[in-house]
Amino acid sequence: MVEITNYNTFLNFSEKNNCFVLTPPKTGSRNITRILKFLDFNTYGWDDNKFIFINLGPSHNHTLKLMEDHLNHQVIITCRNPYAILASMFRLSMLPKKTIRSTFNIKDEFIEFLKEYLFYNESDPWLIPSLKNSIDQLKKRKIDHRIKLESFSENIMQIPFIKNYSQETIDQIEMLSKEKHGDYRDIQNHSNIENYFPSDFKLYYKQESAEIVYTTFKDKFIIMDYHKDSWMS
């Protein structure tokens, strides 16, 4: 293995399948990383802007950076309704709360969360200025396959090259595709959370909060293929 000291991000790429996979935050990224090891994906990265092999096997990452010749390869991206992503982040941020004040209004509190998140956040890849060029390129190119969290197992089994693997491998992948994703695992020890923070993301929104999310993450809506009005009941 090549020793790299100054690469700044990772990307899962399969030479065998001529495909790279993008796994943005809160889209089932840990689940699919476990699956990618059965599909000949390895970890690559950048060293002085040169795209190089890093390690055998996939890595859990959230990069949106593209290699220069990305149009010569297929791309798979894990997806989730952006409205649901932000509601999930708010919900998880409230897990440490022991008590909820009687005047608590979930829709108003969510708007305050959004304003704070957008003002202070420096790690969300969709908000990092240096990744804007890659995001613009993603919008223009063909997305070969989307794996949506809402239909995760079904979309996993529709990966175009999965049929090239043994039935034993396919069965293993199907089993892994049905495991609960991270949000569920994070809240399972907080039995009272549903009383205050329901899992239905639409219950967090009103027009103002929907406008904030759509305006800020319009590129995400386009790339992941979700409608502007998908927050409505």
Image: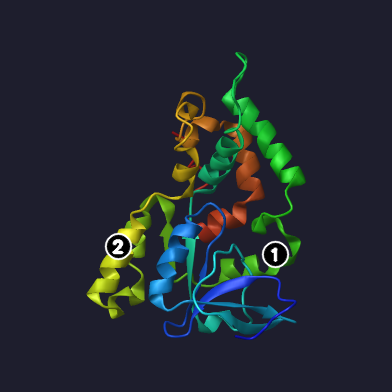
Q: Position of residue 219 (x, y in %)?
A: 60, 57
Q: Residue furthest left?
A: 167
In terms of sequence position, does the residue under pointer 1 or pointer 2 come before the other? 1
Q: Nearer the viewer, residue 70 or 210?
A: 70
> Is disc 2 surrounded by few (<14), some (14 to 19) or many (20+) residues within 10 Å?
some
Q: CA distance from mark 1 to mark 2?
A: 34 Å
| Horizontal relation, residue 115 to residue 19: left or right | right
Q: How many marks?
A: 2
User: What's the residue type where badge 2 is placed?
Assistant: Glu
Is 176 above or below relative to 46? above
Rendered-image quadrant of the C terminus:
top left
Residue 162 badge: none
Does residue 157 appear anywhere in the picture? no
Q: Which residue is mark 1?
A: 132
Q: Position of residue 85 (x, y in %)?
A: 54, 46
Is 173 above or below relative to 184? below
Q: Nearer the viewer, residue 214 or 12?
A: 12
User: What's the residue type where badge 1 is placed?
Assistant: Lys
Q: Which residue lies at the image location 70% right of the left edge and 64% below the top edge?
A: 132
Q: Nearer the viewer, residue 213 or 77?
A: 77
Q: Position of residue 191 (x, y in %)?
A: 45, 29
Rendered-image quadrant of the N terminus:
bottom right
Quadrant in which residue 94 is drawn = top right
Q: Which residue is mark 2?
A: 174
| Horizontal relation, residue 169 to residue 31: left or right | left
Quadrant in which residue 138 is drawn = bottom right
What secondary structure is found at the residue carrying circle 2?
helix
Q: Position of residue 91 (x, y in %)?
A: 56, 36
